[in-house]
Amino acid sequence: MAAFPDQSVDSAVASAVVALLSVVHSPWWLAAYAMTVAVCWSRVALRYHTVAQTVAGASLGAATAAGFWLL
């Protein structure tokens, strides 16, 4: 059983990568959130996750990246 069954890990990873790249390199990397949206859309279109699960995953990924940055 997964640790967080009600969220999309794919969306979380995509969001965390973009957030960390924007902090480490340049805020211009925030434009790559378009790719995160594409990942979320694909998970919903393939019926692997619901919209709520992808939003929860993307939010968790961004929050995790922020937490690491603050350390």
Image (tube, grey):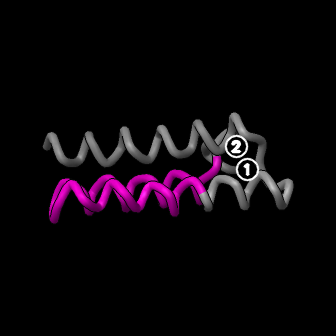
- Disc 1 on helix, strand or loop? loop
> What is the x, y in percent for residue 14?
48, 60
Q: Secondary structure at mark 2?
A: loop
Marks 1 and 2, how far apart at CA? 8 Å
Q: Nearer the viewer, residue 42 or 13?
A: 42
Magenta stretch, main secondary structure, is helix
Apparent side of residue 37 relative to residue 29 in the rendered image (left or right) = right
* Lateral position of residue 35 relative to residue 8, left or right: left
Q: Is residue 54 above or below residue 48?
A: above
For residue 1, the mark is 1
The reply to whether discs 1 and 2 touch (Cβ–Cβ < 8 Å) is: yes
**Residue type pointed to by label 2:** Pro
Give the camera-side residue of 36 and 54.
Answer: 36
Residues in magenta? 8-37
Residue at the disc numbered 2: 5
Tell me the residue at 68%/40% (across/down).
53
Residue 53 horizontal side relative to residue 13, left or right: right
The stretch drawn in magenta includes residue 11: yes
